[in-house]
Image (tube, rainbow, N blue to C red):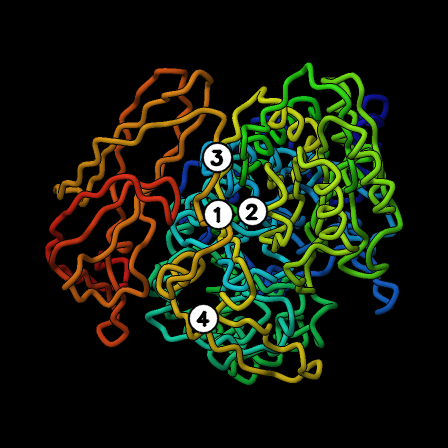
Amino acid sequence: MRIVRLKKIIPPLLLAGLLGGAATVAMAQGNAAAPAATTAAQDQPWLNPALAAEERAALALAAMTQDEKKLLVFGHFGSALKYKNYMPPKEVRMGSAGYVAGIARLGIPPQYLTDAGVGVATQRESLAPYLERTSLPAGIATAATWNPALAEQGGAMIGREARASGFNVMLAGGINLVREPRNGRNFEYGGEDPWLAATMVAAQIKGIQSNQIISTIKHFALNAQETGRFVLDARIAEDQARMSDLLAFEIAIEKGQPHSVMCAYNRYNGPYACESDFLLNQVLKKDWAYPGYVMSDWGAVHSTAPAANAGLDQESGYIFDKKPYFGPQLLGKALKDGSIPQARLDDMVRRILRALFASGAVDNPVSVQPIDYGAHALVTQADAEEGIVLLKNDGNVLPLAASAKRIAVIGGHADKGVLSGGGSSTVFARGGNPVPGLGPKDFPGPIVYHPSAPLEAIRRRSGDVRFDPGTDVAAAAKLAAESDLVILFANQWTGEALDFPLTLPDGQDALIAAVAKANPKIVVVLQSGGPVLMPWLAQVPAVLEAWYPGTRGGEAIARVLYGEVDATGRLPVTFPQSLDQLPRPVLDGTDQKPDVSFPVTYSEGAAVGYKWFDLKGHKPLFAFGHGLSYTSFAYEGLAAEMTTDGLKLRARVTNKGSRHGSAVPQFYIGPAPGVTAGWEAPHRLVGFDKLALAPGESRQVEVTIDPRLLATYDSTAKGWKISGGTYQVQLARSAVDFVQQADVTLPARQWPAAKQGK
């Protein structure tokens, strides 16, 4: 923020000098005259933007020295670490995620890396002032919009801020499926279903990369919990992984085309994910024909030759690894003794170069630029509004009338701001953290709030509004009894490196129960990173799940509460009634010693989330896909047809109410009784849409189904298989609320997993 203000009065080259020599070069390159660029393209043909990225990468690779090649495969952490006595290279953007040196003589820019998926983050260890930037709502909130266009718009916004902050690589694209609802990083991800997660995360990646920068997709693969994340061995059968977590990655890579894949900390069926020949070479690069590069997570590299030969292309966060495994000394030794072939190093570098050319990062060097925070605030607010889920609304307590009097707002620091998730993705909003001093002093803390106070937004809409912090249950109950209506904010902070129980902390369950007893006209607004248990649910008529709603979250919450916009969010995860309903009621690894590997066997296979509940006959607290509206919709006219393009599904949705609203028709499919298809669960989500409809308006929905969603994976044949027969298509409001059924006959079909066979 300070940089943006200074830029108005400091000449660009002087400002760049203050930011580091690399920025000076980038700005100077950005101001270079066209004839100079033409000459450079003649002398250095890889700088010719008319050539394909693959050709440019090959030309640049041929011009590089061995030492220059080594530069591109080794990255430094971008912040000082006192406990490691580490100071990064002077060229870094201090406080950033990382830095990879460029090659100035060849016109190859440095790689400036920033976390993460909701905006430009500042690492808490930074010796520099925090960058204050716009934060989107949590990734799980964006997934709850079920609106890919909105996800792409949000990605474009944070990508613009990354570019304007001097970064050309954004560590976004979190797509690990929510297998473990206690996972502290679930808030970063796209939910529990591979099709929904892939669709939403791919859209955000497309938006980010529209700014001529690189986005990652992460964490490859099965990084499903934080407890023991550095050592746990995720064990799963190949076919089950291919139909769940790997399928989410596969589809998202096809749709979003991220230029980099980040491999995970954990082991995968034995080897570390960043040393997994199966994941990196066989699946990603061979079967999926992925042309980009694989970067490591920060501290996920354990070797030189084994990692490189297994498919890792870049060690991206050195100082967290025990050794600089891809640094010039160890890498040089491995090249000299032949344990890493020269051809492998060339492939590593070629992939990185291709990404830099294909993304536009070479032709459009980054530099610090002004940011339109006002315009960006509207983007994050729109995302937050559409992601808020109305879970319960008995008696139509919501929306609130502007004439509502004597409103009590209780708890959740609602007088200060809205909650955000913790860890490497933490964004510090403009105005700082209004609730300092909370949470862990070390990573993944501190707990950070964004200064968008719901209380202030509510007071702008209603006159007599009083606040109680909720720290004294008796005082809160007294205020509730004296009020006509209560809005109670209940928070659960979650963050990277930790897992969390599904219970609200700090006695908030008791607070809600006491306040509801004092005044049964109560609305509970949850701010959480995933599902929570609700022992008080029967006492409460209305519940909103607001997730971590971003830097304009307070205003977004108020607009939904007052019906200025419809409640249009739908759950991207299942909310269980109890831990006993989970595949693993007891979290694996809680009794293990640090640094000692332990297995986590995913016996549920591909039956993740709602599929597990469907398979076992469990009734959830709130189902995947659930979400109420302030209007009502009719779903009808379901039709299924096999065409030359595949299975097409059609339906009609009509707004039967008196208010504008958005419907989210969902299509599920499953084998009819008697058909042996080998599916992991009775039903799968195969398509959805989101329709904004005026009162009385009716629109047709048509979706074409990806054939992999109708198939099983055959690990022996290394391909997909659809069992021929009758299947039942369900038009639905959620995974348990089926409205209309149609039968369709699917022909038997097989095809190989390798892309050339599709």
The x and y percentages for residue 254 are 37, 49
Q: Nearer the viewer, residue 542 or 172?
A: 542
- Helix, strand or loop at mark 2: helix
Q: Where residue 593 appears, x then y in whole percent?
A: 70, 84
Q: Earlier in the sequence, mark 1 or mark 4?
A: 4
Q: Amino acid at mark 3?
A: Leu
Residue at coordinates 70% horizontally, 66% vertically from top-left? 318
* Left or right of 700 in this view: 305: right
**Residue pictured at 58% horizontal, 49% vertical:** 172
Give how far apart the Cα atoms at labels 2 and 4 are. 41 Å
In the rendered view, would you say 275 is above or below 262?
A: below
Point out the tag, 3 or 2, that comes first from the N-terminus.
2
N-term-proximal mark, 2 vs 4: 2
Q: Does the image show residue 353?
A: no
**Mark 3–mark 2 CB contact (< 8 Å):** no
Closer to us: mark 3 or mark 4? 3
**Quick one: label 3, few (<14), some, or many (20+) residues within 10 Å?**
some
Q: Residues within 10 Å of mark 2 (few under 14, many from 20)?
A: many
- Name the amino acid type tagged 4: Ala
Query: Where is residue 307 shown, x and y percent of the image?
Result: 54, 75
On the image, numbered disc 2 is attached to which residue? 140
Residue in the foreground of this view, choosing between 375 and 326: 375
Q: CA distance from mark 3 to mark 4?
A: 56 Å
Cα distance between the residues tagged 2 and 1: 7 Å
Q: Which residue is mark 4?
A: 343
Which mark is in front, 1 or 4? 1
Q: Do the residues bearing badges 2 and 1 touch, measured as CB atoms within 8 Å? A: yes
Residue 572, disc:
1
How many residues crowd mark 1 within 10 Å: few (<14), some (14–19), many (20+)?
many
